């Protein structure tokens, strides 16, 4: 089992920056990759960013390219999402997810690619 705990959410102004953290515990040695998703009220969960633990390969949704940066600290088993130039539409709940099984082809945009999810952290961007 892997436990994921997100933190760092809060209330910010449009244009501000915020860094989210996702700390993994449990059988973390079996993790292969991590992802961040967002979910607005009444909407489906959308992909934000992806990173592999081994070589730090990253992949982003078009809507956040150039504004968000995903990174990882292997020693701390923690993944970060640095969010810059925040917009009111960046406001939903952010979830991190872990892939704990090997894969031949990464499908980071799909929720079912991941095996574990955190409880989410709320980000509110006021205009």
Image (cartoon, rainbow, N blue to C red):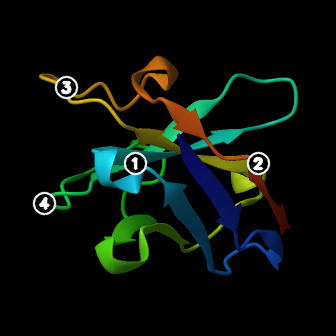
* Mark 3 or mark 2: whose residue is earlier in sequence: 2
Q: Which mark is residue 34?
A: 1
Check the image and report above or below for 83 versus 109.
below
Place of residue 103 in the rendered image (x, y in percent of width and height, measured from the top left):
19, 26
Q: Which residue is mark 2?
A: 93
Place of residue 105 in the rendered image (x, y in percent of width and height, measured from the top left):
15, 23
* Mark 4 or mark 3: whose residue is earlier in sequence: 4
Return the residue nearer the eye: 10 or 75: 75
Is 122 situated left or right of 56 in this image?
Answer: right
* Mark 2 or mark 1: whose residue is earlier in sequence: 1
**Secondary structure under badge 4?**
loop
Q: Residue at x 66, y 59 (%)?
A: 5
Answer whether labels 3 and 2 touch (C-beta < 8 Å).
no
**Secondary structure under badge 2?**
strand
Q: Which residue is mark 4?
A: 55
**Secondary structure under badge 1?**
strand
Q: Which residue is mark 3?
A: 103
Return the residue nearer the eye: 6 or 57: 6
Marks 2/1: CA distance?
Answer: 17 Å
Is 23 situated left or right of 31 in this image?
Answer: right
């Amino acid at each position: 089992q892997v436990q994921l705990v997100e933190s760092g959410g809060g209330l910010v102004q449009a244009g501000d920056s915020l860094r989210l953290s996702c700390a993994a515990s449990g059988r973390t040695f079996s993790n292969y990759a991590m992802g961040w998703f967002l979910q607005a009220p009444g909407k489906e969960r959308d992909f934000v960013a992806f990173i592999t633990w081994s070589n730090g390969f990253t992949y982003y949704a078009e809507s956040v390219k150039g504004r968000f940066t995903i990174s990882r600290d292997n020693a701390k088993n923690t993944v970060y999402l640095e969010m810059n130039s925040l917009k009111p539409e960046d406001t939903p709940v952010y979830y991190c997810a872990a892939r704990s099984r090997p894969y031949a082809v990464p499908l980071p945009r799909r929720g079912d690619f991941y095996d574990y999810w955190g409880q989410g952290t709320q980000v509110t961007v006021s205009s």
